[in-house]
Image: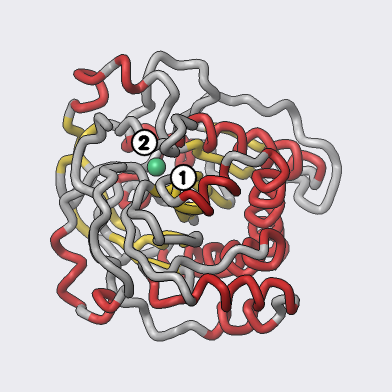
Amino acid sequence: MSYTGPGFDPPQPRRSRRGPLTVALAALVPGALLGWAVYAAVGGSGDDEGSGSTTASASPSAPASASASSRTSSPAPSASSEDEKPSAPAAASGPLEGKVVVIDPGHNPENFKHTAEINRQVDIGTNRKACDTTGTSTNDGYAEADFTLDVAHRMRTLLEKQGATVKLTQDGDRPFGPCVDERARIGNEAKADAVVSIHADGSGTGNRGFHVILPGAVDAGAADTRAIVGPSDDLGTRIAGNFVRVTGSAPSNYVGDGTGLVTRKDLGGLNLSTVPKVFIECGNMRDSKDAALLTSGAWRQKAAQGISDGIVSFLRG
Ligand SMILES: [Zn+2]
């Protein structure tokens, strides 16, 4: 569709530590492991967030992650989405009382009507990228922007029950966007304890599973992620482990080398964040099996629960 930008850049090599994820995965229930095994039999490639180009792209395997050089080139914009708007009512009492969580529903259902505005280039520190992108959709037309907003609403409900103060970067109440730089700014200005940008990928058929995108260490222009890399890794690892546990979905079979974790330095929403933040691509909208999950309200509830459980785990330490 009208996505700007190419799709996904090869994931960067992961830092050595996979300890936490290993631990989290070890806790998987048998059913989840079974599901994972089934996934492992499928091949694929994929692309990512936001951008949406549906090109089937790269084929299976995420070997690219091994090449350290892969990360520098990431052109693809895409991405993030975040926005502001206060939305949530005051927090109730609970274990997360006093904690602020910003949920960034990727894209905006109305972005496609505002091509000029969302194509405007914004500074992301390392580069300039489109303000925002339209996002992808399933082959039957279920838009990623509708998916992200629905999951965000479900998460807000769950997290507010834990006592957190929850803000959404956009709540379907803006004509377009916000731009990726503003999405980051909203989390920063809220002094969020954790920010999660919700997405679903637009990759090739056969590419399945979720992946969490972690910020790489960037120090360029307005971007300086060095202080958030560590806590964001912790946040993302906990989200990945809980997402597997609750949804039974397997980590991506096309990026991340089976870890469900990918590090990137080309996303404005991460580069410009000064608070712990990750993205999650909940599945591939262009794969029919993943699409069947993503279009199910019951599955989206599980996805929201898994992500929220990861946030709760991170915030409670
Ligand atoms: Zn997206």
Query: Residue 252: in sight, yes or no?
Result: yes
Image position of 101 (left or right of 316): left
Calculate the distance from the C-alpha at mark 1 to the C-alpha at mark 2. 8 Å
Location of mark 1 (residue): 199
Q: Which amino acid does label 1 sit on?
A: His
Q: Does the residue labelled 1 lie within 8 Å of ligand 1?
A: yes
The residue under the point 57% across, 80% down is: 20
Quadrant of image for the C terminus: bottom right
Image position of 11 (left or right of 250): left
The residue tagged with tag 1: helix, strand or loop?
strand
Tell me the tag on residue 135: 2
The residue under the point 52% across, 70% down is: 39
Q: Are marks 1 and 2 in contact (CB under 8 Å)?
A: yes
The residue tagged with tag 2: helix, strand or loop?
loop
Quarter for ligand 1? Answer: top left
In x, y percent, where is residue 264? 31, 61
Question: Taking 114 as reference, is 156 above or below it?
Answer: below
Quadrant of image for the N terminus: top left
Closest to the observer, 105 or 135: 135
Question: Taking 223 as reference, is 206 above or below it?
Answer: below
Q: Does the residue labelled 2 lie within 8 Å of ligand 1?
A: yes
Q: Which amino acid does label 2 sit on?
A: Gly
In x, y percent, where is residue 140? 46, 33
